[in-house]
Amino acid sequence: MSAVTAATSSPASAAGKSTLVRLGEAVVSRLVIIIPYLWLLFFFLVPFIIVFKISLSQTAIAMPPYTPVLDFRSGISGVIAWFGTLNFDNYILLTRDALYFNAYVTSVIVAAISTVLTLLIGYPIAYGMARAPATIRPTLLMLVILPFWTSFLIRVYAWIGILKPEGLLNQLLLATGIISQPLIILNTYTAIFIGIVYSYLPFMVLPLYSSLEKMDHTLIEAAKDLGCPPTSAFWKITFPLSLPGVIAGCLLVFIPAVGEFVIPDLLGGSQTLMIGRTLWNEFFANRDWPVSSAVAVILLLLLIVPIMLFQRAQARAQEQDQ
Amino acid sequence: MKSLGSIRRDFAPWNDPNAKPYIQFDNVTKKFGEFTAVNNLSLTIFEREFFALLGASGCGKSTLLRMLAGFEEPSAGRILLDGQDLRGIPPYRRPVNMMFQSYALFPHMTVENNIAFGLKQEGMAKADIDKRVAEMLKLVKLEQFAKRKPHQLSGGQRQRVALARSVAKRPKVLLLDEPLGALDKKLREETQFELMDLQQNLGLTFVVVTHDQEEAMTMADRIAIIDKGEVMQVATPAEVYEAPGSRFVAGFVGNVNMFDGKIAAGEAGSASINAGNGITIRTENAGSAAAGTSVTFAIRPEKIKVSSTKPAGAVNAIEGEVYDIAYLGDMTVYHVRLDDGQVVRASTMNAARLTEDPLTWNDRAWVSFRPDAGVVLTR
């Protein structure tokens, strides 16, 4: 109400408005910005600080299973004592044992390959959707989102039934005579790729679709008009203009895929090594909270780089739209 | 000899029976499903002509342009360019370029890369491209904007980039789809003359689609008036205005007063039209219409004189009452209601600052016009 008054009233009357009212307006507008920051503070920063704190402690047979760190109850002397006991043993352990390094590298490679595969499959789908008649586009969009209506866990579980040696896929291929021996897919990296591509495809398709859909088709006509054949027009016009969607889609797939636990656990079996499973093992099997916390902190630092790239791409896309 | 006004008196290949048409639409029909956008249409356009397709939105004029560009194929008939049948030739192999209504500038490319795009497709040498782009930037006066992206330009600047890009390849024909539609009025008027100069200097054939009759009148050598996918008339702006071929054309271009009636007496070079309610119009432009033919007499507002007394010696003078006056500064428009109820629109140039014989609302007034002032339409 007061905002409306401020917009329509003359400068003289605006100046006459009480300081209290203006202060109130300022507080309200700040409050709106504060809410998301509070959310981040309580649900990201505070948990992260807790995890970071645990990663600096030692395991102990206790509840919780680590030595207490930073005891505020003893005041300043407690903080000083904490600085004295501060040690990065758990991080040093991560560099000593090749297991962790391999798990990180494998996770990043698996996530990167999966992301490329998802892009290769998702792009034609998104392109087809964006070029489909406007009347059926909402239906197609619905179909992309539809799998989310079933639990992620159950959908991944279903893939075991498809991929196992006596599963649906092998039965089909054997019956049609394409293969004579069942393919071993389950419990291999191939199964992980299939699982990730399947599960994360909507996250690739949706941003791609939104960037392709808003693209002006006359740009392609203009390119053709200027002597550019269709394939070349795709690479010179359509693809560069869909890059914000490509980047968004790739990051939305890559980031969660690196830390993915369910898919490697259910489809990858014990032969595959990914950081999500390593973390789970440290936490639940070894009950080594400090080391698993250290693994999580490093994982986050690894992922912050692509997240920041994503943010920058977004900012640039917004700038372009203006 | 009396003649109709014309912009380029020396240029009239359409009057030359030996002139070779450059673009030819031969009985072209285009259907979209059940809808017929273009219906059995034939047109010829000559080299170096500035040709306008004028019509209301949805009349099929844009479809004609898109067929010429190659984005649509005719359902029937053929289109020839310089003697070559264009059927089956994709847009990227046609020697025509189009300036799009939305400009369709590539948002991720700078102004110079937009202009160079078509040249790069041709495989032109880098040095030649740079030279041509510089030339084009100079032509549209955008030299200092070469490195800008389209979103950093104003509407008028974008329009000029679009123009530069479409003429950069020196196409045989430049197609312009509502080229000035997105500009404000003042800029539009300036740009009209720029376009005309450009067409003259480059010696290109321009085909422009517009719904703005003023734009078509200003720029074009000839105008084709399109309605419901058919050509109503193809003529110079002066002919379209002063000698419309049908009631539709007369009503579509500019303002007009129309009187329906029958030819009463056929004398040599002159006729009377009985327009009912005691109104008889004497005209010299009845042509070969026989007595008894139902005709429409059309006369432009500026050809009608309004006066408070019956002008002495006037061949055509009808009495009525001033019903409305619109003072527009340069001219005044009178709406005079005749005694039979029909309203006649007459406009007078305000050549002097003061009028001796001011007319005002509800005054009795006479509208008068010369026997050669109007046209007789049978269609």
Image: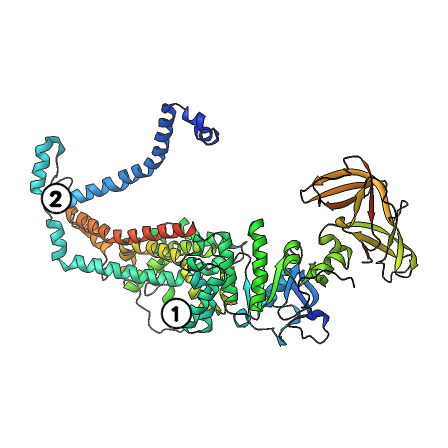
The disc at residue A57 is 2
Locate residue B146, reporting x and y percent. Answer: 42, 60
Question: What residue do we see at 11% from left, 45% from top?
Answer: A58
For the residues labelled 2 and 1, the Cα–Cα distance comes to 53 Å
Quadrant containing the N terminus of chain B in the rendered view: bottom right
Q: Amino acid at mark 1?
A: Leu
Residue closer to the observer: B139 or A216? B139
Q: Chain of mark 1?
A: A
Quadrant containing the C terminus of chain B in the rendered view: bottom right
Indicate left or right for A34 with B124 as reference: left
Q: Amino acid at mark 2?
A: Ser
Question: What residue do we see at 34% from left, 62% from top?
Answer: A116
Q: Tell me if mark 2 has few (under 14), some (14-19) or many (20+) residues whose alpha carbon lies within 10 angstroms of its own.
A: many
Residue position marked by numbered label 1 in the rendering:
A173
Locate residue A163, reporting x and y percent. Answer: 34, 63
Indicate left or right for A238 with A114 as reference: right
Indicate left or right for B195 with B374 as reference: left
Q: Secondary structure at mark 1?
A: helix
Question: What residue do we see at 33% from left, 55% from top?
Answer: A251
Q: Secondary structure at mark 2?
A: loop
Locate residue B38, reporting x and y percent. Answer: 67, 63
| Residue A160 appears in the rendering | no
Q: Chain of mark 2?
A: A
Are dots 2 and 1 on a single chain? yes
Locate residue B369, reporting x and y percent. Answer: 82, 49
